[in-house]
């Protein structure tokens, strides 16, 4: 299972498991776009799920067949593209299939940073065993608890990725190159501004104030022009 930001998430999952066949559970809206895209999804091995029909369990036969063939079953439990920074509520389909077929679940989280010159971060968790539900059909209580557990596992991956990103950003800012680049850029901007604009600086208390401040300090300023931050 994986969070869902864009259609490129499908390509990411395929790239993560290059030597395995992956069957994606796909909502009916994707099939209704046009005939060419519908044909593409069918030949890609996607399994159609009609989310508007509560009794639609026809996909379960295809899922069972794919699982017996040794394929990976990929589910995006948010069920929609998530445009927010927080996880959406999970649908119970993943827990239902895992309980019905007695399959472990691998949680995945991606920041979906699919941009040129920007690295996409992905975190894969350990397989989650939801245990066996009471009876052949998972109960509503078991589905609810299992779905909450799966969402919690993906949330842990999201938090871990966020911490790692902050550590990487901090290390990047503290690197020798970053410090050199900042000082070099600061010197060029200062030289340009003081030659071109010749700012006149005044202090309310010239005896006690100075532009070189010691220790961490917060500086606030009105904002009129683009060159306010450089100055």
Image (cartoon, helix red, strand yellow):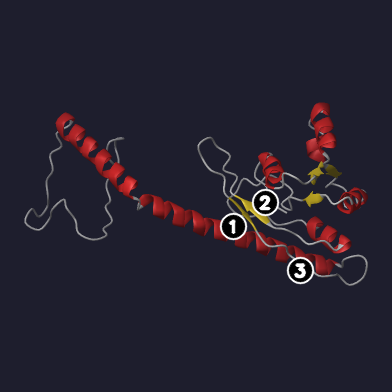
> Where is 107 relative to 185, above or below?
below
Q: CA distance from mark 2 to mark 1?
A: 10 Å
| Residue furthest to the front | 19
> Where is 227 relative to 74, above or below?
above
Q: How many marks?
A: 3
Q: Give the percent coordinates (x, y) of residue 117.
A: 50, 37
Seen from the viewer's position, the closer of residues 56 and 180 is 180
Q: Give the percent coordinates (x, y) of residue 123.
A: 61, 55
User: Which quadrant holds residue 19?
Assistant: top right
Q: Is residue 127 left or right of residue 52?
A: left
Q: Residues within 10 Å of mark 3 (few under 14, many from 20)?
A: few
Q: Give the percent coordinates (x, y) of residue 27.
A: 80, 43
Q: Residues within 10 Å of mark 2 (few under 14, many from 20)?
A: many
- In terms of sequence position, does the residue under pointer 2 or pointer 1 come before the other? 2
- In terms of sequence position, does the residue under pointer 1 or pointer 3 come before the other? 3
Q: Which residue is mark 3?
A: 145
Closer to viewer: mark 2 or mark 3:
2
Q: Residues within 10 Å of mark 1 (few under 14, many from 20)?
A: many
User: Which quadrant holds residue 30?
Assistant: top right
Closer to viewer: mark 1 or mark 3:
1
| Residue furthest to the bottom | 134
Q: Which residue is mark 1?
A: 158
Is residue 231 something one can see in this rendering?
A: no
Determine whether label 2 and label 1 are within 8 Å by CB: yes
Q: Give the percent coordinates (x, y) of residue 107.
A: 69, 58
Determine the secondary structure under disc 1.
Answer: helix
- In terms of sequence position, does the residue under pointer 2 or pointer 3 come before the other? 2
Q: CA distance from mark 2 to mark 3?
A: 19 Å
Seen from the viewer's position, the closer of residues 158 and 218 is 158
Give residue 67's mark.
Answer: none
Give residue 3's mark.
Answer: 2
């Amino acid at each position: 299972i994986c969070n869902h930001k864009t259609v490129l998430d499908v390509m990411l999952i395929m790239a993560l498991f290059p030597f395995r066949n992956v069957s994606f559970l796909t909502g009916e809206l994707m099939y209704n776009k046009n005939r060419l895209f519908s044909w593409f999804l069918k030949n890609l091995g996607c399994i159609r799920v009609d989310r508007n029909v509560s009794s639609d369990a026809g996909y379960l036969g295809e899922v069972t067949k794919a699982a017996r063939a040794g394929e990976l079953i990929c589910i995006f439990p948010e069920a929609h593209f998530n445009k927010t920074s927080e996880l959406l509520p999970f649908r119970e389909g993943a827990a239902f299939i895992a309980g019905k077929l007695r399959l472990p679940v691998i949680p995945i989280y991606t920041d979906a940073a699919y941009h040129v010159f920007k690295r996409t971060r992905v975190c894969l968790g350990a397989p989650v065993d939801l245990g066996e539900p009471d009876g052949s059909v998972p109960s509503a209580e078991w589905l609810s608890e299992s779905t909450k557990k799966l969402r919690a596992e993906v949330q842990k991956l999201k938090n871990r990725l966020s911490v790692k990103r902050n550590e990487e950003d901090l290390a990047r800012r503290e690197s020798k190159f970053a410090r050199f680049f900042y000082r070099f850029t600061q010197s060029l901007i200062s030289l340009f501004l003081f030659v071109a604009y010749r700012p006149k600086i005044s202090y309310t208390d010239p005896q006690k104030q100075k532009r070189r401040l010691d220790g961490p300090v917060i500086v606030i300023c009105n904002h009129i022009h683009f060159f306010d931050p450089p100055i």
